[in-house]
Amino acid sequence: MKPMEIEQKSFEIITKELGERKFAAGTEEIVKRVIHCTADFDYAENLIFSEGVVQILRNAFEQGCDIVTDTRMAQAGINKKVLEGLGGQVHCFISDEDVAEEALRRGVTRAEVAMQKAAQLKKPCVFAIGNAPTALFSLLDLVRKGYRPVAVIGVPVGFVNVIESKQRLLESDLPYIVAAGRKGGSNVAAAICNAVLYQIRR
């Protein structure tokens, strides 16, 4: 089978297995793409969408908004061709030398410093956090001090402070997409971004 045929067949299987389940407007394609990249149907239940967030993301990307991620893996997984065609680009500062040096000097994680560097970007940004809860905590601390991202995709994965970081995002007034519980990952963050981008590309 050709790659596109494999993807089409995969989505047909996902649609069949989801059955008659109903989704809020704009969210079904996101849920299906996350399931496609994880083979995990739990995401049909644990993805949480703030009101109107999908349209907020679509509008932002259509206007050339940038994306900030917390990992190179998420950065690699986002369809940069589609995003760049809309005037945006993907940033990830986690491996920057100045970020590593500052994190070492202060005794904090590179993820924390990377978010602080991202907040200095001049363009509006969507944050897609798929790995480090410290990145999400750092971003929310910046929000408390006045920084305002367009929206936050908060899907860090793991066991330490993951649920707590997501809960703080859920309690904020930011537009968000959150994967409840411990699940998530860089691939999930990228899949959510791509699902919205592909809605625009159609």
Image (cartoon, grey):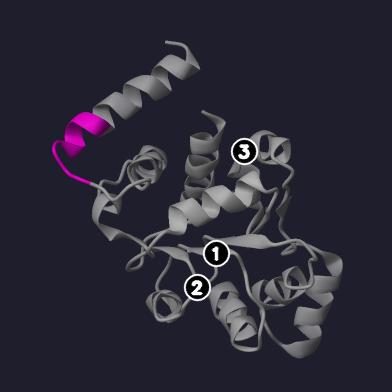
Between the residue at mark 1 and the residue at mark 2, the CA separation in whole angstroms equals: 6 Å
Tell me which segment is drawn in magenta: 15-22
Q: Residues within 10 Å of mark 2 (few under 14, many from 20)?
A: some
Earlier sequence position, callout 1 versus callout 3:
3
The secondary structure type at the circle numbered 3 is loop
Residue beneath the point at 62% across and 48% down: 61
Q: Which dot marks residue 177?
A: none
* Residue 199 within the segment the image draws in magenta: no
Residue 186 in view, yes or no: no
Q: Residues within 10 Å of mark 1 (few under 14, many from 20)?
A: many
* Relative image position of residue 164 (x, y in whole percent): 40, 81
The quarter of the picture where residue 155 lies is: bottom left
Q: Amino acid at mark 3?
A: Asn
Residue nearest the observer in this picture, 91 or 82: 82
Name above or below for residue 26 compared with residue 151. Answer: above
Asked if the residue under mark 2 is in contact with the one under mark 1, i.e. CB atoms within 8 Å, the reply is: yes
Between the residue at mark 1 and the residue at mark 3, the CA separation in whole angstroms equals: 18 Å
Q: Which residue is mark 1?
A: 151
The quarter of the picture where residue 129 lies is: bottom right
Q: Amino acid at mark 1?
A: Ala
Between the residue at mark 3 and the residue at mark 2, the CA separation in whole angstroms equals: 24 Å
Earlier sequence position, callout 3 versus callout 2:
3
Pick the quarter of the image with the N terminus.
top left
Earlier sequence position, callout 1 versus callout 2:
1
Q: Which dot marks residue 174?
A: 2
Residue beneath the point at 69% across and 34% down: 81
* Relative image position of residue 17 (x, y in whole percent): 18, 34
Q: Which residue is mark 3?
A: 79
- In the image, which is nearer the foreground, mark 1 or mark 3? 1
Asked if the residue under mark 2 is in contact with the one under mark 3, i.e. CB atoms within 8 Å, the reply is: no
